[in-house]
Image (tube, rainbow, N blue to C red):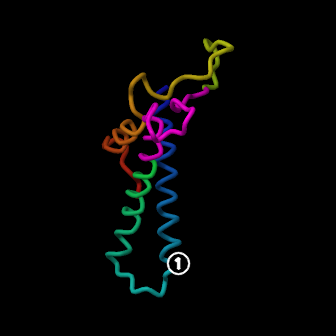
Amino acid sequence: MDFADSFFATINRELDTYAHHLRRRIFSTYRDMPWTDDHRRAMEPLLRTELDYVVTQILGIFDNIGCDRVPGGVLGYAITVLPDDTAGMGDDDMGVPLLPDGQDYADAWRDYLSNPHHVKTN
């Protein structure tokens, strides 16, 4: 199973849902503003682009081992997967790395988004 693809697909679905939710809240909160059809069509993709950027920035924190983006006393962070099937995982094993060694999380997220197979639903 491709754990990274599943992880990014879950984030992708959540962002689509949240971008739609934000769009509805903005238009509801500011319903007295003179929104045009162009504004309405542009809002959700714009929100989604900004949410993609936020996720990229958050995942980038994992990619900055030993730099000023992580607090003192912390070398870095890693995302691991805890599969249901624990066969082959020792008692000391803390899971399977989400990505192969050396691959950046933020780059993998951008690659996921740029793959035409992973078209956004909005």
Q: Is residue 50 above or below residue 81?
A: below
Label 1: which residue?
28
| Left or right of 11 on screen, residue 88 | right
What is the magenta range?
A: 56-82
Question: Foreground residue, 71 or 57?
Answer: 71
| Left or right of 35 on screen, residue 78 | right
- The amino acid beneath tag 1 is Ser
| Left or right of 118 on screen, residue 31 | right
Q: Is residue 120 magenta?
A: no
Residue 56 in the image: x percent, y percent?
A: 41, 46
**Badge 1: residue crowd in 10 Å (few <14, some 14–19, many ≥20):** few
Q: Is residue 74 magenta?
A: yes
Q: Residue at x 40, y 58 (%)?
A: 50
Of the 4 image quadrants, the one containing the C terminus is bottom left
Residue 3 in the image: x percent, y percent?
A: 50, 30
Q: How many numbered discs, if any? A: 1
Q: Residue at x 35, y 75 (%)?
A: 39
Under tag 1, what secondary structure?
Answer: helix
Extreme residue toward the front, this view: 72
Q: Is residue 68 above or below residue 1?
A: below
Magenta part, dominant SS: loop
Q: Quadrant of residue 67?
A: top left
